[in-house]
Image: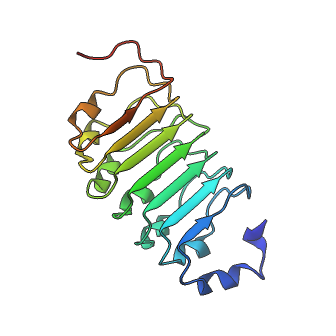
Amino acid sequence: DFTLDKKILPKVPKLTNLMALKLGSNHLQEIPSVFLTLGQLTYLSSVGNPLNTINDSIGMLSALRFIEFSGTNFDTLPSALCGLNRLQSLSINANADTLYIPKDITSLHGSLSELKIYNTVMDTLPDEFYKLEKLQKLVLYKCSLPYFPYHVSKLPALKELWLDSNSIREIPK
């Protein structure tokens, strides 16, 4: 468990040019805050870590463009992610709880072009979802959506919509 490794963690801030970080399958419940000081980081991946939340200091990663989470335990999309004004792509796969997307996601309206949620139960999207004016690709695969998310019809830049393997019974006319 490298969160307790007193030899490795002090050296992380010295990785000032690090642009990509993958923390797969380390049993982390949170991303160690020392990693949130890497100012050049553009890609962050945490696959197989049961993250419960994201530290607010992730907002200091102003270069962060791509985030990939899999195997998380979020009940709500962490609001700290909504402060990443350059975030272009957010992917969440196999979240353990029903995922609630807060209306704060619309703060990414100027940057988010791709949102992918896989194998994660969702009830709905926020009413303000249509404000994501740059969103070009929306994947809601195996999300148990009970109905067609009508908000998507208002997304001006949307080019790809994936709604495979949900519980949608009717597509609006």
Q: Position of residue 99 (x, y in %)?
A: 50, 38
Residue plotted at (27% across, 17% down): 172
**Image side of residue 57 versus residue 149, left or right:** right
Q: Position of residue 83 (x, y in %)?
A: 37, 62
Front residue of 17 and 126: 17
- The relative height of residue 91 versus residue 10 in the rendered view (above or below) is above
**Image side of residue 146 versus residue 95, left or right:** left
Q: Quadrant of residue 161?
A: top left
Residue plotted at (66% across, 56% down): 29
As drawn, which residue projects farthest toward the bottom?
14
Look at the image and tell me in which quarter the C terminus lies: top left
**Image side of residue 27 versus residue 170, left or right:** right
- The relative height of residue 24 versus residue 97 in the rendered view (above or below) is below
As drawn, which residue projects farthest toward the top?
169
- The relative height of residue 144 versus residue 140 in the rendered view (above or below) is above
Front residue of 160 and 85: 160
Q: Position of residue 133 (x, y in %)?
A: 23, 48
Look at the image and tell me in which quarter the N terminus lies: bottom right
Residue plotted at (68% across, 85% down): 11
Residue plotted at (54% across, 84% down): 16
Counting the numbered discs, the total is: 0
Q: Position of residue 90 (x, y in %)?
A: 45, 51
